[in-house]
Image (cartoon, helix red, strand yellow):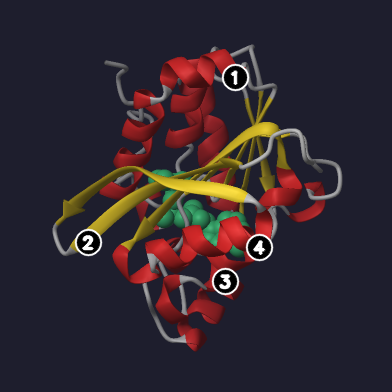
Amino acid sequence: MLPTPDLSHLKSEDYRHVYEPAEDTFILLDALEEDAETLRELRPAVCVEIGSGSGCVTTFAGKILGASSSLYLTTDINPRACATTKATGCQNTVPIEPILASLVGPLRARLKHAVDLLLFNPPYVPTDAEEADAAQDDAGIAGAWAGGQDGMAITDVVLDQVENLLSPRGRFYLVAVKQNDIQGICGRMLTQHGLRGEVALQRRAGREHLYVLRFHRERPDRT
Ligand SMILES: C[S@@+](CC[C@H](N)C(=O)[O-])C[C@H]1O[C@@H](n2cnc3c(N)ncnc32)[C@H](O)[C@@H]1O
């Protein structure tokens, strides 16, 4: 069992501004660990995490794959999250390049069909649209959870970009909750984007029913 990355450099003051790893983070770590062998065989050259927060997830991916085997890029709208991600990578000897940007931001064109491992634990909590918009504008801690209608306002934008980002054998891991409509997400990704989705892990955590969805191309030869 791989240990959770060392986060001892982070204090409670940091978590007032940056999302503290929680059950949704840990289910994503568990899904990556279950797939560790397959992921190593994939030999990802480019890993991208959208919304890296503390940096815990990309650091963990780096521990699975090897610090120097891949380029680890992350984005976040929260500047403190970018700084924290860098610090967590350093603390655990995983070199991470954090980018202050919304979603994939300026990298989108350059990463076309180049991302071997794409990770996203989004703000998935259903809120009203105004709350989600304000959280995105403020780029602070509320941006970690405020997800707008059905909790899908931010995720929806990413779902439409995934096919364009993934390399032929690329994989995308997405955290979601039941209210996000798991079947709807998988159905839409298949019919609109040719990406097959499946539940990699699911579990209840308090009032939440958490899922990790895993996507890959239906036809890897068609990019
Ligand atoms: C639920 S937290 C997950 C943090 C971390 N990945 C984890 O699993 O612990 C969601 C993260 O997404 C970031 N975020 C929200 N909207 C974003 C956007 N439009 N672009 C990039 N990051 C965003 C938040 O700032 C926050 O760090």
Q: Mark 2 to mark 3: distance in Å?
A: 23 Å
In the picture, the disc for residue 159 is: none
Q: Is residue 168 left or right of residue 112?
A: left
Q: Position of residue 107 (x, y in %)?
A: 79, 46
Describe the element under mark 2 as helix, strand or loop: strand
**Residue position marked by numbered label 4 in the rendering:** 192
Residue at coordinates 32% horizontally, 49% vertically from top-left?
24
Per the image, label 3 sits on a secondary structure element best described as: helix
Q: Amino acid at mark 4?
A: Gln
| Label of residue 208 in the image | 2
Q: Does residue 164 appear anywhere in the picture?
A: yes
- Compare marks 2 and 3 and give the one earlier in the sequence: 3
Marks 1 and 2, Cα distance to the nearest angstrom? 32 Å
- Residue visible at 51% across and 74% down in the picture: 135
- The picture places residue 119, in percent across and down from the top left corner, at 53, 42
Spot occupied by residue 188 in the image (x, y as percentages of width and height): 56, 64
**204 relative position to 94: left or right:** left
State which mark lies toward you, 2 or 4: 4
Asked if residue 150 is positioned above or below residue 26 in the image, the reply reads below
Task: Please state which amino acid type lies under the numbered disc 3.
Answer: Gln
Determine the image quadrant of residue 71: top right
Amino acid beneath label 2: Glu
Three-letter amino acid code at disc 1?
Leu
How many angstroms separate mark 4 from mark 1 (CA)?
25 Å
Between discs 4 and 1, the one toward the N terminus: 1
**Residue bearing the label numbered 3:** 136
For disc 2, the neighbor class at 10 Å (few under 14, some 14 to 19, many from 20) is some
Confirm or deny contact between disc 4 and disc 1 (CB under 8 A).
no
User: Counting other residues with Cα less than 10 Å from the Cα at mark 3, is it few (<14), some (14-19), or many (20 or more)?
Assistant: many
Determine which of the numbered discs, if any, sits on residue 42 in the image: 1
Ligand 1 within 8 Å of disc 3? The answer is: yes
Mark 1 Cα shell of 10 Å, populated few (<14), some (14-19), many (≥20): some
